[in-house]
Amino acid sequence: MSVFVTRDETLPPAYSQALESHALPPLWTALHVLLPKERVTAAVPHRWSWREARPLLHEAARLVPIEQAERRVLVLENPGLKGMYRITSTLFAGLQVILPGETAPSHHHTPAALRLIVEGEGAFTTVDGIKCTMERGDFIITPPMRWHDHGHEGATPVVWLDGLDIPLVRAFDASWVSPLRPARVPEPASDAAQAEFRWPWRATRGALEGLAASTPKDRPVTRAYVTLTGAPPVATMGADAHWLRPGERARAGRSTAGRVFHVIEGRGRSRIGETELAWEPGDTFVAPPWHWIQHDNGSAGEPACLFSFNDEPAIRALGLWQEERP
């Protein structure tokens, strides 16, 4: 992280002391940090291995009761942002596990949340009383200030990837959560009711497969998750599903948005800036802002499918969007 220098050593010490005592630091000592000539971020490209994280997550489920944890999550913390509980400067990510028979209490909060189901079946999340079933690869959102809880009616643990805009909301001093209340038994799920909050992977995968068949080989196959009105899933975060054809190498350029990727199917490699990351199903990796992104599907004869979420809607709303294409 950049360190501010608040004293100008060329000034008389008594004057510098007077500035400090009146909370009037000179801008010229820190201007190069506040307005750097090159885009910089403390976040670094990184991959979290599912093979390594999975046993630790299941051990957490054994060691920490849901009543103690409220939400049993292991945070995907960027090594460049140690101690900050962030995967990029504006995004939070974590892996959450729930066991059969457990219920996570209901609450609502100012940060928006999205979820990508990683493993297991039989769990559900309830948003404003609407029960959304959780199946592997499903994408589910919880917009800000919506009451939500989680339950599990199945037989094996269920894990999902959480993405939230907590760091961004905290930057506005707007992060808040309600007192907990017991989860209520939800009404049976219906596809029509769930459509506001849930995108089933089965339908998304089918759409990607069809898109791949009609998309020229030199163009990436990406399908954005949008609401019924065509808007991003939540106001601050976008999400996409990517299909990499066998042997495909796709360059996605770079932009002022940070992006978190999760591997649903396939094996391959991604180059994020100067860092090369190998991945397999269940892995999660991050591309900080203004890093060139290239995906390479190394699966012999098989497609690869990636899910990603980003802060692009917030970046665009703030007038900070910029991108470069290869």
Image (cartoon, rainbow, N blue to C red):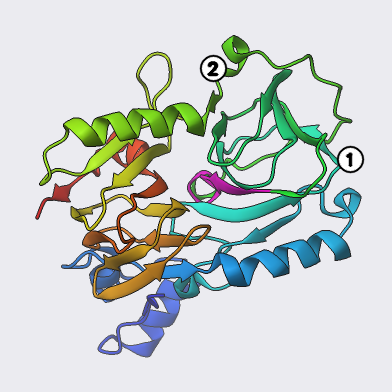
Q: Helix or strand or loop: what does disc 1 sit on? A: loop
Question: In this orientation, which residue lies closer to the viewer: 141 or 33?
Answer: 141
Q: Is residue 218 above or below residue 13?
A: above
Q: Distance between the residues labelled 1 and 2?
A: 26 Å
For the point 67% across and 40% down, which residue is it?
A: 176
Say which mark, if any, is on residue 101.
1
Q: Helix or strand or loop: what does disc 2 sit on? A: loop
Q: What amino acid is at disc 1?
A: Gly
What crowding class fits label 2: few (fewer than 14 Cα within 10 Å), some (14-19), or many (20 or more)? some
Residue 310: x, y in percent? 39, 45
Residue 151: x, y in percent? 80, 35
> Magenta span has 81?
no
Residue 255: x, y in percent? 22, 52
For the point 49% across and 60% down, which residue is it?
A: 87
Q: Is 256 on the left or on the right of 173, as rendered?
A: left
Q: Is 155 on the left or on the right of 235, as rendered?
A: right
Report which residue position mark 2 lands on.
195
**Which segment did they paint magenta?**
159-169
Q: In this view, does 311 lie above or below 3?
A: above
Of the numbered discs 1 and 2, the one sitting upstream in the chain is: 1
Which of the 4 image quadrants contains residue 114?
A: top right
In the rendered image, the quadrant that contains the N terminus is bottom left
Q: What amino acid is at disc 2?
A: Ala
Q: In this view, does 75 lie above or below 229?
A: below
